[in-house]
Amino acid sequence: MLRRVSSLWVLGLMLVVLTILAAVSGSIRMTTLATTIAERADAELAVRNSLISSLERYTEAGAQGDVPVAAKPGSMGFSVTSAYAAMPAAPLAPLAIGVGDLLPYYYRLDAHAAYTLVQGGEIENPLNLRVGGFDVAFVMVFLLPIIVIALTYDIMSREKELGVLALIGAQGVRLSTFIAAKVIARGALIALMIVGSNAMAIAAAVYMGAEWHFGAAALWVAIAVLYGLAWFALAVLINALGFSSSTNGVVLANIWLVFVIVIPAIVKLAATTLYPAPSRVALTTELREAATEADERAAEAREAYMFDHPEMVEGDVDQEIFFRQVALSEQDIAASIAPQLEAFEAQAERQAALMKWLKFSSPALLANDAFAALAGADRAYHAAFRAAVLEYHQRWQAFFLEPLMREQLLTAEDWANLPAFDYQPPRRYLPNSAINLPLVVLLVLGVALVAAGLAKYRRYSHI
């Protein structure tokens, strides 16, 4: 009977092709990001090393002539050099983009205040960012249920409509035996399709450069299998209600629409409505006002300095003086807008806490969050990276600001102690609630649906 179901092989092949294409697409994206960031970091390093070499020659020559730029902490920290801090990729990063198209994957750091941290140039096509990425998690969460429904919406109703069940009953075969054999065979085949397609996708990602980890791969496949079998169990239950094949298809299609599209949209709407983000207009206004006040204080400080140093009025003003004023101004601005930035962070945390519980309203949300957590593409993984970047930025900024404020020059020995970004991300593929809890819930959901279906099939009619 399975060999005669042509749609089974067509849909199975479609699942394999889509999953592999999604893995290749995600791998290309990750490779592009890594290559571009590495090129920019190497270019920055080459310029910095060249300037440090000129400082070393200046020192060896007995500090004769103009002071090299590399000796000026203000010019180097605020204008010439910078550092790139990139988020380390998790073992299965190409398989799930998650919030990676919304949150920065890397930061370009300099001596400016932390509130100025932004991405140093956009790598992605803006249209791609708006539409969203195509990854294996998308195939599993959105498309896999459709394939499972297409394979099982008429698993028993078609046999009744064709008179097969009546014929089997006339042959003395127990209906429960036939139902169990058909459900087990079809379910095992679907599970094999899911395992095979995901194994090929993981192999493709590893071949294209992704880090391999058996535990991460096993958890990924387990999530996909349990999610797919939950939809299979739901289809078996709907078949047990005795509807026609067309009715089963309509009911299952509507259930897919509700749990995969509608409920996730409602959850997002609920989070943003109950905990709306503070006004960005107010933040922009406060930032502008703080910058204006800081500029006025800086102008007064410059006038006082010129009054004390009349010899510099007609000459070139030392750039280090300017950068000291910039640093002081940004400190004032940061203090002024700190309450607004804290309000944004607080609302974001409240939204995340609410969505952490609302995700249990849909198996699609559960599976998607588990995939994202496993691939290091969830908000918690990005939050840990951002906290490490902010700590690194403090050390990087202090390297330049401390000698700048003390009116000291940098030496070649100082450059040997330039801070480096050494971040070890959390190992998300180890046991943790973000992955284990969805696994347990999906398993319980599948078992409950199977039990309900078996109970219904006890009263199932041959005709």
Image (cartoon, rainbow, N blue to C red):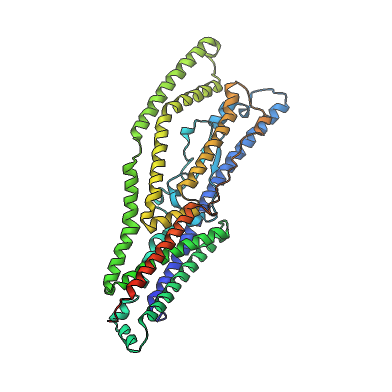
235, 141: nearer the viewer:
235
Instruction: For the C terminus, give its image quadrant.
Output: bottom left
Please name the residue shown 50% across and 54% down the image. Answer: 374
Image position, residue 395 (x, y; %): 58, 33
- Is residue 139 visible from the viewing direction of this image? no
The x and y percentages for residue 462 are 30, 81
**Residue at the image position 38 percent from the left and 43 percent from the top:** 351
Question: How many numbered marks does the figure carry?
Answer: 0
Task: In the displayed orientation, state which residue is furthest to the bottom.
Answer: 171
Quadrant position of the N terminus in the picture: bottom left
Q: Is residue 37 above or below residue 76?
A: below
Q: Is residue 369 above or below residue 308?
A: below
The percent coordinates of residue 317 (x first, y second) are 54, 19
Name the residue nearer the viewer: 54 or 426.
426
Percent of width and height locating residue 256:
33, 62
The foreground one among 443 and 108 is 443
Is residue 257 at least partly visible in the picture? yes
190 and 169: which is toward the camera = 169
